[in-house]
Image: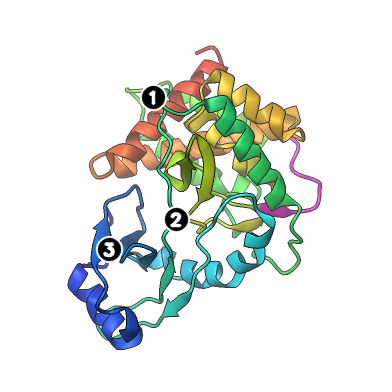
Amino acid sequence: MHDDEVEVDEALVQALLADQLPALADRSLTRVEAWGTDHAVFRLGDDLSVRLPKIGWASRQGEKEHRWLAVLAPHLPVEIPVPLALGEPTTAYPFRWSLSPWLSGANPTPDGAVDQVRLAQDLAAFVLALQVVDGAGGPSPSPGQRGGPLEPADRFTRRRAGQLRGEVDVDGLLAAWDAGRQARPWDGPPVWVHGDLMDGNLLVLDGHLSGVIDWGGLAVGDPAVDLMLAWSFFDATGRAEYRAALGFVDDEMWLRGRAWATSAAVQALPYYRDTNPDIVARSWRAIRAVLADLGR
């Protein structure tokens, strides 16, 4: 998916395990074909997973998750993949990698198989529980990162949106982006945000939210970013239920959340158009929902 992607295959993972976690080296190893763009994921036996960054921008994710997920996990109503070990780089592989529990469940799909109202309620309960955990010392968003102010992401968002002219209402999308960018910024205390809540990072079991994975966007910042799923996954009913169940979302925050959903979609669509059909489909869902919001 990326020009400078590191190749990760089963032989490499087996070599890393044999060298650094030899007690696990004889377990079965199966590559997981998932939505992920920046990690290769392998299932190790029945109850473990191995995650290896494929690209430099994801190289510190394992360390962040190792530092903070153990702090968050006791306070959350669903499972999260608290790392059990961090592997070291070698001459054959340049990044730290992580060993985590394998969490049961499946990604929800927007085809009606999951009750969206129930999922919206479960997800709101998760977000509310995350926000009340003490964020002292937690990572702040870098400039342009979700969870921070929108303005630093303006130039890149506009450039990516411009690549979609001729196939979508770019002016409408930029109107949604500008409405969020110009909305009153978050003036409350920064809170924990997942930063990348989307259907590919949620797990559902027996009709309920059971787990949340891929915490690379974890930060302490503006909670508006965790509204993005309202447009990228939920239908109008689910979207309204999610907002109502959260209980703290004013109109200004709603505009900022919609702006982040717009930015994520217009950035991902041209970049992953030929390499990740799931991300492309999710991006189009968000674009259609945002434009429908505007009556366009």
Q: Is residue 14 above or below residue 29?
A: below
Q: Which residue is mark 1?
A: 111
Label placed on residue 223: none
59 or 237: nearer the viewer: 237
Q: Is residue 70 above or below residue 186?
A: below
Q: Is residue 163 above or below residue 87?
A: above
Q: Which residue is mark 2?
A: 103
274 or 134: nearer the viewer: 134
- Decide: few, some or many residues near mark 3? Use Cα within 10 Å; few <14, some 14-19, many ≥20: few
Image coordinates of residue 263 in percent, x first then y, are 50, 38
Image coordinates of residue 109 in percent, x first then y, are 40, 32
Measured Cα–Cα span from mark 2 to mark 1: 23 Å
Identify the coloring. Answer: rainbow
Q: Which residue is mark 3?
A: 5
Image coordinates of residue 243 in percent, x first then y, are 67, 29
Q: What residue type is disc 3 on?
A: Glu
Q: Which residues are magenta?
A: 184-192
